[in-house]
């Protein structure tokens, strides 16, 4: 049987949750010694990966079982590079058009702002030409009261 001091060391700050020592020792004595883990989860653990899940007592067998969460990894499509700029790029994803510009601070604030403005104008010009070449794209037109669905 565990002493009260050992139990306090085991539980740290959560010790007040169990107010009486006999109640805690009854819980510890009733705990099962083996945990059933599905082979899929065990293979992932042996491979050095983390497995998130829940630990439950099975209602039918009364045994302690581990059930892994069925999480699926999201595969996101790569962004299409529309334009590569001198200090950045313009990319197009499924839902957004991304503009990135990175200029060294040592150029000074006026040169930095002019370089960023120049690249922004170049990016806008490229997007406009892309729209005219491809045609009128519904996904790039601004939402107004006329064309809202």
Image: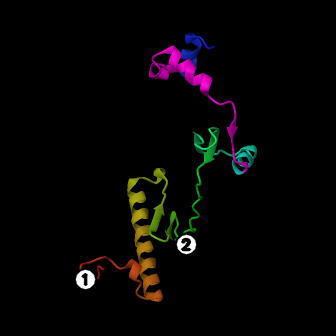
Q: Is residue 22 above or below residue 134?
A: above
53 or 102: nearer the viewer: 53
Numbered disc 1: secondary structure: loop
Quadrant of the rendered structure where residue 145 is?
Answer: bottom left
Quadrant of the rendered structure where residue 128 is?
Answer: bottom left
Question: Which range is magenta?
Answer: 12-39
- Residue at image point 39% right, 63% down: 114
Q: Position of residue 80 (x, y in %)?
A: 55, 72
| Label 2 environment density (alpha carbons within 10 Å; few <14, some 14–19, many ≥20) | few
Q: Which of the marked residues, 1 or 2, is nearer the chain's N terminus? A: 2
Callout count: 2
| Label 1 environment density (alpha carbons within 10 Å; few <14, some 14–19, many ≥20) | few
Question: Which label is found at residue 80?
Answer: 2
> Is residue 33 inside the magenta stretch?
yes
For discs 1 and 2, the disc positioned in front in the rendered view: 1
Q: Is residue 19 toward the left or the right of residue 81 in the image?
A: left
80 or 146: nearer the viewer: 146
The prevailing secondary structure element of the residues shown in magenta is helix
- Residue at image point 53% right, 20% down: 24
Q: Is residue 67 above or below residue 95?
A: above
- Residue at image point 69% right, 46% down: 49
């Amino acid at each position: 049987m565990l002493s009260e001091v050992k139990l306090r060391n085991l539980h740290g700050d959560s010790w007040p949750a169990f107010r009486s020592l006999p109640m805690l020792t009854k819980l510890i004595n009733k705990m099962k010694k083996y945990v059933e883990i599905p082979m899929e989860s065990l293979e992932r653990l042996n491979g050095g990966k983390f497995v998130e899940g829940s630990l439950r007592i099975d209602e039918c067998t009364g045994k302690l079982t581990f059930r892994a969460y069925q999480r699926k990894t999201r595969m996101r499509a790569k962004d299409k590079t529309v334009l590569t700029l001198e200090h950045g790029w313009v990319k197009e994803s499924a839902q957004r058009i991304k503009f990135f510009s990175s200029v060294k601070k040592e150029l000074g604030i006026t040169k930095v702002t002019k370089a960023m403005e120049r690249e922004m104008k170049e990016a806008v010009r490229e997007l406009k030409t892309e729209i005219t070449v491809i045609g009128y794209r519904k996904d790039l037109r601004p939402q107004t009261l006329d064309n809202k669905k």
